[in-house]
Image: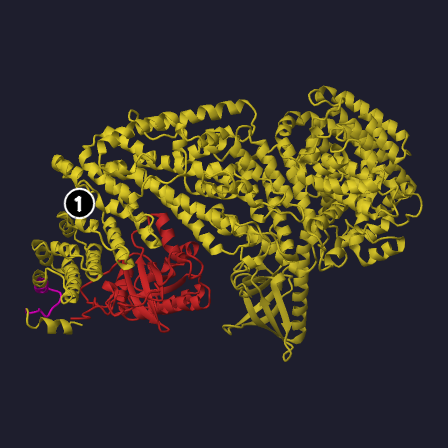
Chain colours: A yellow, B red
Amino acid sequence: MFSKQRSWLSGALWKPKNPHSLEHLKYLHNLLAKNQTVTEQNRSQLVETLRSISEILIWGDQNDSSVFDFFLEKNMLSHFLRYLQQRCGRYICVQLLQTLNILFENIRNETSLYYLLSNNHINSIIVHKFDFSDEEVMAYYISFLKTLSLKLNRHTIHFFYNEKQPRKDGLGALKTLSEPSREPEKHTNDFALYTEAIKFFNHSEAMVRIAVRTITLNVFRVDDKAMLRYIRDRTAAPYFSNLVWFIGNHILDLELCVRHDMDHRSRDRLSDLVAEHLDHLYYLNDILTIGLDTLNLVLINHLLNNLFIPLYVYSLTKRKKVADAQDDRKHVSSVVSLFLLSQVFLIMHHTQLVHQLAEVIFHGDITLTQTEGLQNSPKAGIREFRAPAEPLEKTLENNRPKRRYGQTTVGQDEGAVGGAEEGAAYDPGEGVSSPSTEGALSPSSEVCSGDTELSSPTQNSTDEEKLIGMSHRMAIPSGMPDRLQPFTLENRPYLETLFTALECTENDYSALFALCLLYAMGQNEGISQNLMDGVLMPTERSRNKENYNILLVERLIRIIEQACQSGSKVRLATLELSIKLLKQLVNKDDRSYLQDRHLACIENGRECSTQRLRNFYKSEEIFLDMFEDEHREMKNRPLNVEYLMQDASILLPPTGTPLTGIDFIKRLPCGEVERARKAIRVFFLVRELSISLLHETETQLPLTKEENCIKVNDVLDLNNSDLIACTVVTRESRRQERRFLVIDPVQLILVEPDAKRLGWGVVRFVGFLQDVEVSGDKDDSRLLHVVVHKPSSTMHARSMPILSARFVFDDHIRCMAAKQRLIKGRHRARQQKMQTIERLLDITQVEGAHPRGSIPGRSHPVHPASSASTSASSSVTSSPGTTAQPQGQGQGRGARRVTAEQKRHLQAKAAQRSKTRQGMVARSSPSPARDGVEIGEEATSAMAVQSLSQNANGSNSSSGCRPGGAVRAQKGGPAGIRGVQSAEGRLEIPLEDLSTRGKQLRSLSFERARLSRLAREVGSLGNQGHQQASQHGLVARSHSLSPRRTSQETSTLMSRKDPRRQSAPISIPSSSSPSAHRPHHTSKYALTPGGLPQEGRRPHSRSNPVPPPGSSSDDSPEGGRTRSWSGPTPKSLQPAATPPASLLDGTVSTPPVLVAAMLVPPERTTIVRRTSQEEEEEDEEEDETEEESSRSTMRGQADDKSTDSALSSDEAGPCSSSDVTPSSETSLSDMSPAPEPRAPPVSATKESRSASKQLTALAQLVQEHYPYDAAEEAAHADANH
Amino acid sequence: MSYAYLFKYIIIGDTGVGKSCLLLQFTDKRFQPVHDLTIGVEFGARMITIDGKQIKLQIWDTAGQESFRSITRSYYRGAAGALLVYDITRRDTFNHLTTWLEDARQHSNSNMVIMLIGNKSDLEARREVKKEEGEAFAREHGLIFMETSAKTAANVEEAFINTAKEIYQKIQDGVFDINNEANGIKIGPQHSPANQNMPSGGGGGNQGGNCC
């Protein structure tokens, strides 16, 4: 490569042979000296010379110090500078920059570095105006600066910062005034490396911007006072204000992108913008964490007043529609601002910044925004997102002369900072006359410091003092008074927006972000607990969490409840985040501070999710695999909020289609399988939440307990075990091993005899039987092909079988035996797990006919818990089960239930009440119009379903919303329509009511709870009324699910063919008077042992359990049906012979428990006991005669009515429960301030006793008149109000 | 000067594995590898030809910026290709690959092409990581693999060019959105290559003594 050169050189000088030597450098220096001017002819030669110089210098640095001495002695850098100043084009420039790059990058010798930097040539090169439009020059230049910045430390930084300035000053000032821009090379008192770099902070090339950020961070990292002072005084304000403006504009782009991309078309662009915003936040956070307080103050001030507050926070209150019109101030939609703020709180942890920002969000009041509009208000100037008065480069240029002149004292400096913060303070013409500028700036800085707590440092207080002052100012107004007075959203427009966003009836688009924001704020260590307490948001740092924000928790619960319903618009991510946030709010160490009524709601949600999953339950193999896979997935990949908020795809409206490539948890399910998966996941999540709130340990999940499994190298006692000898030939390695095959209930085990103990074996391989695939060999009857699949197969990685081998047995009989046992073992292992799932889901066993006995064909008895827990859980939703419930608790989930007893009861009562009401409605509506009005029934049932699953509405529809609704309900047809209406109407429940209610409820909860309990007892005392009634209602409801049913024949047929219509046969003999017959059906239904057990299994064997024609309208009846089943199941499913016994068990064993846990007033205990006994008797009666049961049903209804009306008369209060979160309704409505004279909210305690007496009397009264017409009953009930 | 595409690369890996030397070795052939001289550089550019198209490679070394999260993040995102380098004579640099890869996958766009490079293949005597291990790692994580030596320049050319080919192929397949510069790909200026035969600064391998 030197050939050409040599030919050129031939006439010039002798060129040394060794390119790495001092001689060569001397020769090159000679060349440079001879070619001081760049021409077309010598250009290439010069380029090569410069390149060679770098090579020799590095070689010299590493090998021969004399090389460097020569370089410095000859001041060769001045040659470099001279070439640059000749504007010789990019070739020389690029080569020079590369040479310098290499020099600074590779020099190891510290002194060499000092020499290189010492004579200010480098600074001159830095400020040289290269042709930055050339992308290669730009890239090399910025790399050069970056390389230099990496060399910065406390010693080297002085070479970059020219300190000669004061001496020159007088002269320089005059010069500057006359010709300020003429001497860029004289940049005295300049920190060129930094100021030149930051001019490119918004360069179009991403790599350049990154380099700039690197340079600034490298500079900030050097702990040098002079540097810091310079940067803060001279560049901080302009740089940060421009940076903030730049970031803000990015946000506006992002907003545009979101607003115009409903179809997910420009996801790439969007994700870039999001990533860019994240980059900025991380960058700002990196600056803040370096911890330069004075610099941070300036930065925070700019961030808050020019970006976060005016652009992000103020936008919170902007609705999308309004956004386009009117307001010309810059803003983004509230969804975007929620998203951005979440990111801010997730990434930034600097106390001052996040604390102030949080304060504005929590306590900021709308007047801030309004005064903002007035331009003359001093605040208007501060908190506004607007462009800096001039571009950064210009400011910096202007700064330079001023700097010389300014003779800066510290005080003046700070004035300048304050002024600069104002953003607008720099007027374009100011550069020349700096004194006037500074004069003008100082006062304005005072203005802003006086005006807002978010001000810049004032002259007289140190930063620390300021900090303290700030936190004081915040703590006093926020924390203290709020603790005394109840929390409201009044005058908290931003927080209110947040809370409103949590509503996800339509979708959970903004709810996800609001959750994330609240969660991030709770997790953010920069926000003091004091401030969080101001809005009743306890965090990990709180000592206890008694004072949590009811309003917020109720919204969270509502989201959870919604997620538990079919057709819900709540994505899994939203659910998981709600759960996270809820735990953050109420869980502390080993304790949950969640109030009982809220816990009851969660428990209810858990039941809902269980029931919903039941719909999807299939006895197919894939269900088990899905079930286990989802559990693994949930455990292995818990939601990472930070990662979630980095995903731009959630910024677009939620969608269902997987074609977008959006993760499953971040979108709605698509298709039946995904719906099933979602149901499974919801079940897990809510179950996990419930368990953690109750502080129990999960005992049933995962289905496979690793710790119970046999592991490789375990030594087993195999005496008396079935062992089959075989030779295992693995497929891949072809290795042959003699093993003994042992088949455990769940595992396939290969053992080797233990050398030490006779009859023992050492485990060499284990695999789960459920994952075993076995097939015979056509040619060799002694041979089996065995594949054991890996259980934890994720969707991403290919699942390799953990064993793939041939098993060669001694003879074909052993082979057959092994095969059979493997296949059976697999089947059994899976079946066993399916049973566990069934137990988890409270699904009645197929063998329901003998629910307590051992199941024929099963190797081990069915756990009694399965039936018991069924009754337990279902009793929660079904009203009369209260007495039976403890029984189930005792047996089935004993451990759990006992602790939760109290809550359970609350809930049970709640469910009971709503059911009772539904029972009435459901029964009454079809009665008159029985034959014709299918629609009516349908609708009613839909309503009943709604009310069941979201009991608030249910009760509303029958009561609250329409006073006297019960009466109208009896008119049949209208009732149906009404049902539909109310079902729809539920969506419009105004959330605002919640707040007031929440408050009232809190105080009343206990008394009310007691009252309602009394009422329930009275009701059950009279008879099994509730149960009957609810069963009744259920029948009517399920009834309506088979709209095609017209006659007994069809329904019977259908019941055989289609067990999903199970309920149909019950209502068969319907030709005669409906009112007389309905109870009749009920009892018959309860007595049908053959039909019901089918319900347990057959529906699930259908491939498509939930036929979904229209998502919600169809889904909800579906949910309703299952719900209805869960109620009566435990009792009604019992074959005629068994129930008394089972019930007896319960009654005998449980009431004490119940009493203890429930805190039932002592005098009531006896009643409870009696009730249960009576109920039991009733049950027997029921079994004996249909008439009897029908009668009892009627009585039950009567009781219900009386109870209802007498108690809190939800029916009477139009507003009583209209606004409560669905499942919290019942418990809440018990305590709702109904305008009912007998149970006024305040005096509830006092009156409870008398009320109970009255109730008893009433119940008796009603009992006597049980054959009342339903209409009369209702009228009677109404009259009571 | 003119090019059809510009690809931005980053080089990642532990310190001392020879990243900047690889970079210099590839971008500037004028620096002959010499036994007693180690030169590296943090940035380099070079023109290559793929499929008859001029493609400019811009390679950014990310060394020294590890302490700032914002910087690491940004670099990954702005690159179309990444060379993940380890030193075959130091087992620990190989062991850290997983961490590097996780980082890269987390922050980069999903289409980024990552090439695994076992550097210093000239030091066969001191080898600690077998070639098979590198191959296995690459196979497992879906990377392209190559052993190189910045000293002897063995495979250096291939490493960069193969990566470029992969990116180019992705562009042809429409995987990369070339209109989005944040991907680390830029479409060249459309103006006619008037000064095409001019040396492209320090970046050009053809720079040596083009015209005299």
Tell whether position A622 is magenta. no
Three-letter code, disc 1:
Arg
Residue A525: percent from left, percent from top:
43, 36
Q: Quadrant of the N terminus of chain A?
A: bottom left
* Left or right, A683 with reference to B28: right
Secondary structure under badge 1? loop
Nearest the camera: A636 or A538? A538
Q: Quadrant of the C terminus of chain A?
A: top right
Residue A355: percent from left, percent from top:
43, 33
Is residue A1279 placed above or below A635 in the rendered structure? above
Q: Residue at x 41, y 25 (%)?
A: A472
Nearest the camera: A677 or A1111? A1111
Q: Residue at x 75, y 30 (%)?
A: A1210
- In the rendered image, which residue does mark 1 sit on? A182
Q: Is residue A935 visible from the viewing direction of this image?
A: yes
Residue furthest to the bottom: A779
Residues packed near mark 1 inside 10 Å, few (<14), some (14 to 19) or many (20 plus): few
Tell whether position A24 is magenta. yes
Residue B43: percent from left, percent from top:
28, 59
* Left or right, A1052 with reference to B138: right
Q: Dot 1 falls on which chain?
A: A
Magenta residues (range): A13-28
Is residue A602 placed above or below B211 in the rendered structure? above
In this figure, what is the number of numbered marks? 1
Q: Is residue A829 visible from the viewing direction of this image?
A: no
Residue A244: percent from left, percent from top:
37, 41
Q: Quadrant of residue A1242?
A: top right
Q: Residue at x 68, y 64 (%)?
A: A824
Residue furthest to the right: A1072
